[in-house]
Amino acid sequence: MGVGVSIFFLTLGAILKFAIEPDVFGESVHMDVIGLIFMIVGGVGVVLSIVLAPRRGRTSDGRLMHRENNPPEI
């Protein structure tokens, strides 16, 4: 999950927790709890994206391979 998706989950969770009345969909659906879960998932996603981003950018290990331009002898 990238940073953009994580921020989307944070925003959606904040809207569900703070902007919508908890009893809009009835007593069986608790929007404030669902919003809190989305905010936790978004926060964990942001942290993991930041922590794992430097590792994802490395494509080489720093070794230099030596190649000769001589064709093999037949």
Image (cartoon, rainbow, N blue to C red):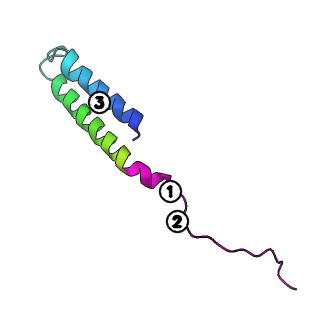
Q: Residues within 10 Å of mark 3 (few under 14, many from 20)?
A: many
Query: Is 19 located above or below residue 46 in the figure?
Result: above
Q: Which residues are magenta?
A: 52-74
Q: Residues within 10 Å of mark 2 (few under 14, many from 20)?
A: few
Q: Residues within 10 Å of mark 1 (few under 14, many from 20)?
A: few
Q: Which mark is residue 1?
A: none
Q: Real-space Cα distance between discs 1 and 2?
A: 8 Å
* Residue identifier under label 2: 61
Identify the element where label 1 is drawn. Answer: loop
Q: Does residue 30 appear in this view?
A: no
* Residue identifier under label 1: 58
Let me know if residue 48 is in the magenta part. no
Dividing the picture into quadrants, the one containing residue 65 is bottom right
Q: Nearer the viewer, residue 57 or 36?
A: 57
Identify the element where label 2 is drawn. Answer: loop
Q: Nearer the viewer, residue 26 or 7?
A: 7
Percent across and percent down for residue 41 are: 27, 38
Disc 2, disc 3: CB below 8 Å? Answer: no
Q: Residue at x 29, y 30 (%)?
A: 10
**Amino acid found under the numbered disc labelled 2:** Asp
